[in-house]
Image: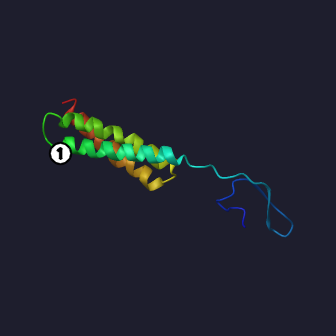
Amino acid sequence: MIASDSNYQGLAKKSQDNTAVYSEIKRPKRKPKRLIKNLALSATLLTALGGLMVASNTAVTRYGFLVWFLSSPQLALANYLDRNLSGFVYAITLFLFVDLLGVCRWIFH
């Protein structure tokens, strides 16, 4: 194994023959799988509900953006905890900016 192995988070020292010697090996941090699963499921349900409310183009449309907006931080947190960088960036950039635009347009105008 090499010193930069992602499965081992510890202190590595080089011996005289340039091989990595682990002086302390720590177990990798465990992902809170149940929390990630619940956040992702809740975000999915809120996204679907908010999307349906917005698509109805009725009086509830303005509140649909609020429901949709609530799913964004949940999805971002789930992707952050799951160490999914692309999903995290997607949730932050697309959802939050689109949702903020919708909330500002439909609620405050």
The vertical placement of 45 against 9, above or below, is above
Position of residue 64 measured from the top left corner of the image (x, y, whole percent): 23, 38
Specify whether residue 79 is in view. Answer: yes
Which residue does the image show at 24% across and 39% down from the upper left?
A: 102
Amino acid under disc 1: Ala
Find the residue positioned furthest to the bottom.
Answer: 17
Quadrant into which the N terminus falls: bottom right
Query: Image quarter for residue 38?
Result: top left
Residue 71 % position (x, y) = 35, 41
Q: Residue furthest right?
A: 16
User: Is 83 drawn above or below residue 4 in the view shown?
Assistant: above
Q: Residue at x 46, y 49 (%)?
A: 79
Vertical placement of 62 versus 4: above or below?
above
Element carrying mark 1: helix
Left of 93 or right of it: where is 52? left
Please name whichever residue, 38 or 2, is drawn nearer the observer in this view of the structure.
38
User: On the picture, is 15 further left or further right than 52?
Assistant: right
At label 1, counting other C-alpha atoms closer than 10 Å, the crowd grade (few under 14, some 14-19, many 20 or more) is few
- Indicate the quadrant containing the C terminus: top left, top right, bottom left or bottom right: top left
Q: Residue at x 60, y 49 (%)?
A: 30
- Residue 54 image point, x, y percent: 20, 42
Work out which residue is located at the far top of the displayed protein and give it. Answer: 108
Q: Which residue is mark 1?
A: 55
